[in-house]
Amino acid sequence: MRSLLAFGFLLSIARLALAVPLVVKPGDEGDIIITEDNTLNQTSTTGPVVQEQAAGELPISVVNNLPGGDAVFAYVTGKDPNGNIVLLQPDGQWYHPEASDSQVPVEISVDLAIPLGGQGSTTDFTIPTFLSAGRIYISVGKLKFHTVKDGAGNLALVEPSALNPSDPSAGLRWGFVELTNTEEGGIYANISYVDFVGLILGMTLTTTDGGTQSALGLEADAMEKICNDLRAQAASDGQPWDKLCVTDSSGNQLRVLSPNYYLDIDSNAFSGYYDQYINDVYAKYADSPLTIDTQSGAGKVACKTGGTDTLTCEGDNRGYQKPTVRDIFGCNSGPFTVQEGDNAVHAAVVPRLCAAFHRTTLLLEGGDVQPSLDASHYYTTPPSNYYSAIVHKYEVDGRGYAFSYDDVNPAGEDMSGTVSAPNPAGLKVTVGGPQ
């Protein structure tokens, strides 16, 4: 995931409260909302550096399995080894954007779209250097990218936003693979549905020693199935699961927002959803311990509430107040924040505790040790995050982040959609589901 600098001039997310969440209405530069989710900040202070011999070339193959004959394009964004923001041009060279002094995002006029062949074809290109905080976007139609200066006067790249229904690219189907490939750490790439489900993507990594790793993504028709199931869940429990599905003005399905994302549109959604469950958890562990297996040097730590609203764990530098629904859906606020100065125990407890709330496993038999229950126990007891449950239901191989701590599992299981290796030979991205 990206680590982004905060903007001193962020436009208020409250503007979304007036937008209709189910139907997009693409706008122009004045409708862009700049957030940490759709910006990439330049960290170089020296400007672009031309290397005589570029290192870290990574061959990319994109297989297009989309029917219909629509024009499909790839884009690559990220930061080069010098910390400069770069976008890949169709000729295989980096484009180094510049920011004007405008306080309104300015569209990049250079055509950066890499055209893909038709259904069944494979398009090859090469990322010419090591890359960090990268994304490989695939879109039906051409996306719009913008530049702006952040609060410190530095260049920032503004990428398409899945959340903003008035974003200039809101009317297109698109998705991305997150990618970092460095000399020190090798390659790390993942498919993530933490924020939204977009264009169906999968990937396979090959390594120089002949190995392969895959995260195959969702079924080709998963978006329709996901929305059908969300509508059924909304009819069952009265929660706005159906509101997560986003369409264009003709009713064509574009994407599915996570409930955490949707709370930025309607902060009152899911109000009180977890309240009784949270109270029951804190009552259960008043005197009997909840054991968190840190899966690290800290080993297993015992946690109790003592009948209070704070869960306290042995060796932890601070406790855990009762979370809100936003805390549980996002796993990055309230008791689930990790602050500077937190010790190793706290950093290990946060993801495991939030994953247990997210999957609603804390009151199950065996749920007093986290993580210990396998995936067959996840999302089996209401209330739960049914977005995550339904997304996993339609993953071809059961892998792909549906929330930020989907990599928390008992030993031997892996729900995350990650491929990684120190010696990548190439990455294949599949669009439209595996064939």
Image (cartoon, rainbow, N blue to C red):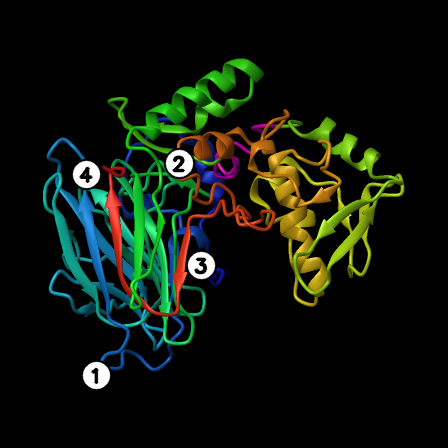
Q: Secondary structure at mark 2?
A: loop
Q: Position of residue 309 (x, y in %)?
A: 82, 41
Q: Which residue is mark 4?
A: 65
Quadrant where the C terminus is found in the figure = top left
Q: Which residue is mark 2?
A: 395
Amino acid type shown at disc 1: Gln
Does the magenta run of residues contain 263?
yes
Q: Earlier in the sequence, mark 1 or mark 3?
A: 3
The extreme bottom residue here reads 52
Measured in 3D between alpha carbons, the distance from the residue under mark 4 to the one under mark 3, in whole angstroms, is 29 Å
Q: Secondary structure at mark 1?
A: loop
Q: Earlier in the sequence, mark 4 or mark 1?
A: 1
Report the span colored magenta.
Answer: 259-270
Residue 298 lies, with reference to residue 143, above or below; the image says: below
**Which mark lies nearer to you, 4 or 3?**
4
Amino acid type shown at disc 2: Glu
Measured in 3D between alpha carbons, the distance from the residue under mark 2 to the one under mark 3, in whole angstroms, is 24 Å
Measured in 3D between alpha carbons, the distance from the residue under mark 2 to the one under mark 4, in whole angstroms, is 16 Å
Q: Principal SS element in the magenta part? A: loop
Amino acid type shown at disc 3: Arg
Quadrant where the N terminus is found in the figure = bottom left
Q: Position of residue 326 (x, y in %)?
A: 60, 39
Amino acid type shown at disc 4: Asn
Q: Secondary structure at mark 3?
A: loop
Residue 2's disc is 3
Q: Which residue is found at the position 25% from the left and 58% from the top?
A: 76
Q: Nearer the viewer, residue 105 or 232?
A: 232
Measured in 3D between alpha carbons, the distance from the residue under mark 1 to the one under mark 3, in whole angstroms, is 28 Å
Q: Which residue is mark 1?
A: 53
Q: Earlier in the sequence, mark 4 or mark 3?
A: 3
Measured in 3D between alpha carbons, the distance from the residue under mark 1 to the one under mark 2, in whole angstroms, is 40 Å
